Each structure stands twice: as C-alpha cells, then as structure tokens.
Amino acid sequence: MNFNKLKYAIARIGIVFTRKKTMAGCGHKTRQKDTLAAFGKTIIMKIFFDEDGSTSHCHRCLEKMTIRCAWCGLPIFIGDPVTLYSPRDKDMEMPEYAVRYKNNAFVGCLRWACADSGADRSGFWYPLGEVYRVLSPLEQCLQSGEMVIIGDLGDIQQALPIEMN
C-alpha cells in the first residue's frame, strides 16, 4: 500500500459539480466531486485524479466502502481518520456492524464522543475496506522522546506511515 496513493478529500461544505465524467478503475463513470450518503449522513467527496486523468474508484463504490464506528455507529467514510480501541470489558458484546482490525481492536471514529483524545488517531479508512495504519501522535512522542505537534489529525500528509510486514 503506497502512502501517497490515498487521494480522497472530504468537503463538508460547498457544492460544486461538473458535468464531465471520467471512467474509474472500478468500471463506473464518476465526476470529480459528488455526494456520498451512508447511515443517515451525507458528505461531499472530491476525488483527485492521477496525472493521466484516471482514478481507481467511483463515488458509488467509495460510498459502499463506508463503515460504521464500532462505538457510536456513525459513518466512517474513505479518508476519515480512525481509532483502534479494544473494549475495556472483555465480555462486552460489540455490535454486528463493528469492524475488527486485529486481535480485539475495533475501528472507531475520531469524533469527540468516541475518541479519548486526538492522540489516539491510529490510521485512516482506506479503499477496499481496510485501515491504513499510521503512527498515532502518542506513538510519535514515545518514539522520538519529544513533543509532537500535528496541525490537522485528518490530514494524511501529516501522518507517519507504519510499514506493515
């Protein structure tokens, strides 16, 4: 998985749609900006095309990759930052829709009601339904032994990827 390949931006305000559609790698035609709706929420997502004008997924396929936060049930769209928490009570029954990461960790959102703090951001929700794991700000502090300042926890360009074997 290439860190620089995640090219999705989520805009929560401003609607600008073009009539021009491009064929995506999934086989569907797509615009650069379109709405995505899942689990009662609607957003506007902009796809950044490659230099040759191509993109891997259309908005409808990206919309189908949306999951629900294991803790609050609200949607996690492609490109959203995620947390990876384990239930505090080992006997806690998780909802059926909860997405398991590894072992007993579940994918959650970074909203105020779910995340203990922004220092727990552990990755981003990535196409084809997986977590693109990055160092959390806390892990960065522990690794460097210094204070870490991150301007935008939702900006994947400010994150440090973890090389997975």
Image (spheres, helix red, strand yellow):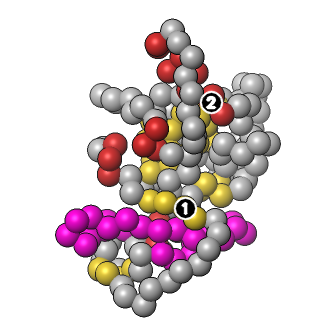
Labelled disc at residue 85: none
Q: Earlier in the sequence, mark 1 or mark 2?
A: 1
Q: Residue at x 57, y 38 (%)?
A: 151
Q: Residue 32, how many percent across, how many down?
A: 41, 75
Label 1 vs label 2: CA separation?
21 Å
Which range is magenta? 33-57
Query: In this figure, which residue is indicated by the disc labeled 1?
Result: 10
Query: In this figure, which residue is indicated by the disc labeled 2?
Result: 120
Q: Residues within 10 Å of mark 1 (few under 14, many from 20)?
A: some
Is 106 within the magenta? Answer: no
Is 44 within the magenta? Answer: yes
Q: Residues within 10 Å of mark 2 (few under 14, many from 20)?
A: many
Position of the N terminus, as image quadrant, is: top left
List the single residue furthest toward the right.
113
Q: Residue 121, how many percent across, how many down?
A: 59, 35
List the single residue furthest toward the bottom.
19
Q: Residue 10, how many percent across, how many down?
A: 54, 61
Left or right of 74, for residue 151: left
Above or below, 103 against 52 in this view is above
Q: Residue 148, how many percent across, how many down?
A: 55, 22
